[in-house]
Image: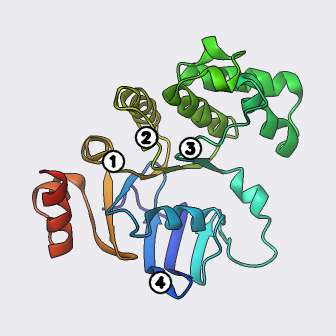
Amino acid sequence: MDKEKGSPILAIKNLSKTFDGVEVLNGISLNVYKGDVIAIIGASGGGKSTLLRCINQLEKPDSGQIVFAGKNINDPGVDINRIRTKMGMVFQQFNLFNNMNVIKNCMYAQMKVLRRSESEAKRRAMDALSKVGMVDHANYNVHALSGGQKQRVAIARALVMNPEIMLFDEPTSALDPKMIGEVLKVMKDLADAGMTMLVVTHEMSFAKNVANKVVFIYNGRIREMGYPKYFFTDPITPEAKEFLQGINH
């Protein structure tokens, strides 16, 4: 099941999170190895996005460990901002800076957090924009872009930080159907280039054809985990079977 032997680059151990007395995550454990592309799927409200937000500490877990770069990042004293530079995060709603143009969106964190020079930040930004097919839009204002273009810029903005892992939180859910394909293509290209990715998604074609591992979350628990070809053709648990029947009708 594991991409390669050795230590995982991200190890989640018995992670739990409660909101207002409701257990949203319950005992989640997952190892992520370099080069893994893991699709996290399941019904809405099952805890998938909360899991990603706990991984980069946008939400603080109640218990459990998240070991990344050899550190339990739940521990007090860990420089979470430094950790986040190595975890690229792409959100549903893009979260771009609307008061900056495309190139400045991709330069800002490099200069502010990594202390790169303006010329170095610009060079890396243009390289990342080239990878997502947006180099010709470098000087566009954000509000002039389509949803698909905004999401590709958001991916470029994450890439410029040279992350070790990319977290995608339903990156196509806010897009028109015709724009979904262009974003999924960029993500497939990243996967093909060896980027380690955790992707919360409702796009089953991506989970089937790009991911090397599927994690099915139901009511805050991992109910099933395995290779896509087995999960989609022969799911084990009743919950997974019901979920797949629902999306196939």
Disc nearer the start of the sequence (1/3): 3
Q: Secondary structure at mark 1?
A: loop
Q: CA distance from mark 3 to mark 2?
A: 9 Å
* Residue 61 visible here: yes
Give the residue type at disc 2: Thr
Give the residue type at disc 1: Ala
Residue bearing the label numbered 2: 172
Q: Position of residue 233 (x, y in %)?
A: 11, 55
Above or below, 130 against 189 in this view is above
Residue bearing the label numbered 1: 211
Mark 4 closeness class: few <14, some 14–19, many ≥20 residues within 10 Å: some
Q: CA distance from mark 1 to mark 3?
A: 23 Å
Q: Quick one: which residue is furthest to the top in this view?
A: 136
Disc nearer the start of the sequence (3/4): 4
Q: CA distance from mark 1 to mark 2?
A: 16 Å
Q: Secondary structure at mark 4?
A: strand
Q: Camera-side residue: 75 or 7?
A: 75
Disc nearer the start of the sequence (3/2): 3
- The tag on residue 71 is none
Residue bearing the label numbered 3: 93
Q: Residue sitting at 46 percent across and 58 percent down?
A: 33
Q: Position of residue 140 (x, y in %)?
A: 69, 17
Q: Camera-side residue: 24 or 75?
A: 24
